[in-house]
Image: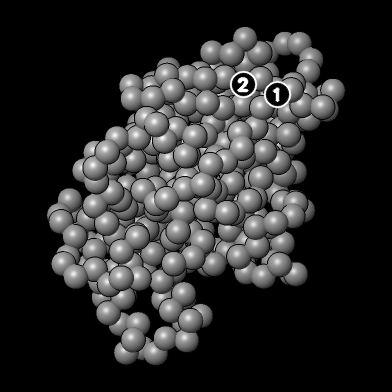
Amino acid sequence: MANYLIMLLVGASISPLALAAGASSNHLLKTREIKFQVPDLTLEGTFECPSGTGKFPALLLLPGSGPTDRNGNSGLGITTDILKSIADELALNGIASYRFDKRAIAHYKEAWPKGAEALNKFFGWRKFVDDATSALKLLASQPEVDASRVGLLGHSEGSLISLQIGADTKGQPGAPKALVLLGCTGRPMGIVIHEQIARLLKQQGATEQIGKPFLDYTDAACKALAAGQPLPPNTPPGLAALFNQTTLDIVGAYCRIDPSELAKQFSGPVLVINGQSDTQVSAIRDTPLLIAALKSRAGGSVESFIAPDASHNLKSTKTAGDDAFDGPIVPGVLNRIVRFLKTNLKG
């Protein structure tokens, strides 16, 4: 399987990644490495902020699914630097940030447990949510940060985690003040995974007869996992990496969670940005549902932007194709993020 589906495979074999380290050469911003402890391992990340003095607003940056590092790059050979680009732009505009390497990065491999059941728990949905919640508290505690002006920015899976934290912490001290959701689905992922697999089958020239068993199994597996039931037997070989004993919890959560319902539970301002040419999350079928849910709230503003000719990673698809990973973030995205944050993370 390709791209987003591959990145779901937290239990897959992963190549080591080089970790970002050291101070930036740009004199307008400064960085430092910060580690933080969660119950079962120590996570590492980069704090970045303007070089001036004072208390800055700040954003926790959360990457997409799978073995994705603090910069938004995958150990499966996908390099986007989407979160690093955003962090640099934020610091140049007076906003601090923190981004960390997820527990699925091979850098932490020595801490991974043995056996499918243990790995399933170690890479479970709540583990990723709790890691991000701890990182949010860490960011708020930094001496350069105004703890009353801290928000969340999530890309893909990170956007779902952002919504979950927003719902979990509603009305509590330390709740995020604003959310920025990039490449966020508006529907439970079971539906989206079906569409992704159908698209891949079509790309590969599969006939309806050949593709039907894959789609039927996908639907049955997503339904079972969402209900906390075992996988159906006889997983097609082409789906075995996605549906296996090490991914039951995380894929089950994807299929169970309705992002639009979570969105209704966050009372603060939200910015939603999706790529017009995103092949993984639909700007037509997902974004309107998410926007409608956010607008239905009693309070909290919502802004949205569909980036023209942009992929899931918000890179230009004009020359790079539908699943573009390389190059700069398309024009308009960074400006929208900065403008939204300056308006909604005021002192």
Does 333 sit above or below residue 34? Answer: below
Q: Is residue 324 visible?
A: yes
Q: Is residue 50 visible?
A: no
Looking at the picture, which amino acid does disc 1 mark? Gly
Q: Position of residue 37 (x, y in %)?
A: 42, 19
Q: Residues within 10 Å of mark 2 (few under 14, many from 20)?
A: some
Left or right of 325? Residue 302 is left
Q: Residues within 10 Å of mark 1 (few under 14, many from 20)?
A: few
In the rendering, which numbered label is found on residue 22? 1
Left or right of 60? Residue 263 is left
Quadrant housing residue 26: top right
Secondary structure of the residue carrying numbered label 1: loop
Q: Position of residue 18 (x, y in %)?
A: 61, 37
Q: Residue at x 26, y 75 (%)?
A: 216
Label located before the other in sequence (1 or 2): 1
Quarter occupied by the C terminus: top right
Left or right of 11? Residue 85 is right
Residue in front for this viewpoint, 104 or 292: 104
Does 201 sit above or below residue 339? Answer: below
- Residue of label 2: 33
Does 326 sit above or below residue 102? Answer: below
